[in-house]
Amino acid sequence: MRSRPTLEDVARAAGVSTATVSRVVNTPDRVRAETRQRVEAAVAELGYAPHFGGRALASNRTGTVGAVIPTMENAIFARGLQAMQEELDAAGVTLLVATSDYDAAKEAHQIQTLLGRGVDGLVLIGEARDPAVYELLERFEVPFVLVWTWRADSPWPCVGFDNFAAARDLAERVLDRGHRRIAMVAGVTRDNDRAEARIRGVRAAMEARGLALAPSAVVECDYRIEPGIEAARGLLAAVPRPTVLICGNDVLAAGACRAVRAAGLRVPEDVSVTGFDNIEIAELLEPPLATVHVPHRRMGRMAARNLLARLDPAAGGACGAERPASLRLETEFLARGSLGPAP
Amino acid sequence: MRSRPTLEDVARAAGVSTATVSRVVNTPDRVRAETRQRVEAAVAELGYAPHFGGRALASNRTGTVGAVIPTMENAIFARGLQAMQEELDAAGVTLLVATSDYDAAKEAHQIQTLLGRGVDGLVLIGEARDPAVYELLERFEVPFVLVWTWRADSPWPCVGFDNFAAARDLAERVLDRGHRRIAMVAGVTRDNDRAEARIRGVRAAMEARGLALAPSAVVECDYRIEPGIEAARGLLAAVPRPTVLICGNDVLAAGACRAVRAAGLRVPEDVSVTGFDNIEIAELLEPPLATVHVPHRRMGRMAARNLLARLDPAAGGACGAERPASLRLETEFLARGSLGPAP
DNA sequence: ATGATAAATGTAAGCGCTTGCAAACAGCAT
DNA sequence: ATGCTGTTTGCAAGCGCTTACATTTATCAT
């Protein structure tokens, strides 16, 4: 079987030079209509598709942006990415996804790999990472955007929400319902500014009302069901028992609900439970889970736009020198059945 | 800022030729230890990373395999991909993920794009697609593997399970519990052999016992909660009412459960519900969802291995001419609370 | 020591594409 | 016709890397 057709094959078939074929492919309006049609016919005839490597080498662009997320298994990232991809696809850009498993070293390695593959831009989750990584990013002069996080004075462009404020807001709603004995099933804070900010948010809300969140009332665990159950079980054993379990995300909250029941208690009559993210299961649980809605899809879409604006200096409005604006998205507390008044 | 270092920069710094540097990077054992160290030092010093495009162009390999899945939002694909990626990463291969949104035309387009990017291999979901796509695949001589599907006489290498048999098996369990009035909330069968096989499986089980699955007792809908609720609502309005809703996957089943309750009925006392996939929510629902466990992670891992074996002819045992074996994975019916005896 | 053999390294020819520059051409006022 | 401008096209030089082949250097039995 003959091998893949090249630009030259097409050029020969159409009776033009390779330069013209290249122009037909990349900048059709620079070619006379008649010539263009002849070339397009040859392209179709031969089934020509440009060779990615050749193009990348010659133009030093790849039409690719990379994203490093902690895991694909969490629906929130999947949803955000899906939206991002839709937006990028529309601009003819491909999304390259890598996972870090919530591990900073793995993340750094994945970033390296993506840079090696010549991504034109990068999407990263959260802000906490080794300064060396940021240096690397700057050295490669690759535009990047941080998502799932937002902070007023962050030195980097972010498209996300204020985890601290959202958690504080949620804790206030909890406090409003009379809860005083509060415990937290938190995510692992190591290398994770979001998990850490959520704890700080809850603590701030409590301190504003003269309460303290004891270190023993906070357990960190992986964002999975079983660890969530385990952590909640431990917290429920405290005397006096907490009246509410504030959880780092919905998955942990689902685990916490199970633990409450396993302890022979009811949600929310005996113990209230709250989540964070508003993934699909939040509404499916019985009782439905009180949580914080995060606009994942919108976040993905806006992150994509932010990056696209900086990718193509021509299309990107001004000369690209201006700092692209960070974007703060609003979250919304959803009061649902799993949060009741303090017993 | 100086631009990215090239092979030549490293060669100059280490006082060797570019060929030697290339060997250090790709086949270290072909280089004398002393020389290798000198080169490695230069690499580290300059922060050299090979240019992907250059490498792809010269070697005609990319160290990349592509996967086209219907959507990232369904946890089953996410989980399978995650496992696949782990396996590929270990072999130094990168996974490129694209989504088709359950649309055959989009899928074909994504395949084209991936081929254009020079993927060395391809993972595709299911078997149903235009023959032209298979022709394209053969013309590019790119090895591919089909997952989430398995059929004894498929002409293509598959790593998956027998959707027909699994659904028939499930239906038999349902029939064993005395159900006779059976309705199905199925996935959309257009371009989707898995959804179609599951319906056929249920129908076969019924016919084996002299029952018929009326066309009106089957509703196809998108694999999302709301359409599932809607479809179930319609089916529950039938007179006489079905005693069980067999659903195309767990998401639809979750919707069906809600619809049953919304109709003022109980699961499973009034209407039983079954799912398919055994995603996380299956166990979290109240009552827990009877479903078919699919070894998604294992499937991803085995698919990766299958592809890897054909990627590198050197490592792949024989001369690569032999047809790589398809692999059939076992599924398991999980009896859980949502399936009760017929009322 | 000496040649035969094997290992290490260098030379240089591309891989397929983009793009600055120059040549060819078309359109148009003079 | 003539020169002018602006558009369309071709020429050819790389982009950074791999690899067949040639050359140099090390190894070793004799």
Image (spheres, coloured by chain):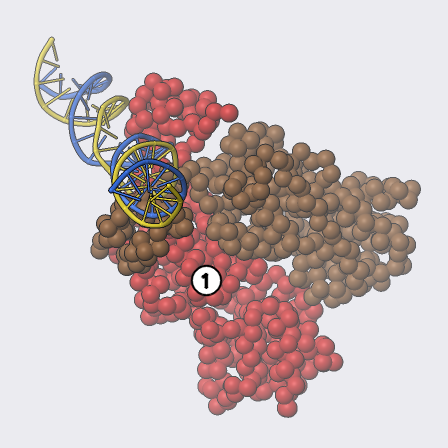
Chain colours: A brown, B red, C yellow, D blue
Residue highlighted by disc 1? B106
In this rendering, the answer to whether B155 lies above or below B238 is above
Q: Quadrant of residue A337?
A: bottom right
Location of residue A100 with respect to B231 vertically, above or below = above
State the residue at coordinates (70%, 57%): A278
Say if residue B304 shows up in the picture. no
Tag 1 subunit: B
Q: Quadrant of residue A194?
A: top right
Q: A182 or A79: which is nearer to us?
A: A79
**What is the three-letter code of the residue carrying label 1?**
Lys
Where is residue A10? Give x, y as percent. Answer: 27, 51
What secondary structure is marked by label 1? helix
- The quadrant of the image that shows the N terminus of chain A is bottom left
Give the camera-side residue of B189 and B79: B189
Q: Residue at x 42, y 21 (%)?
A: B41
Q: Quadrant of the C terminus of chain A?
A: bottom right
Task: Please say whether residue B40 is visible from this viewpoint.
Answer: yes
Relative placement, left or right, of B261 versus A137 is right
Which percent across, then down, holds residue A109?
51, 37
Q: Where does residue B185 sit, x and y in percent of width and height?
A: 57, 77
Does residue B10 sit above or below B225 in this rendering? above
Q: Is residue A53 left or right of residue A174?
A: left
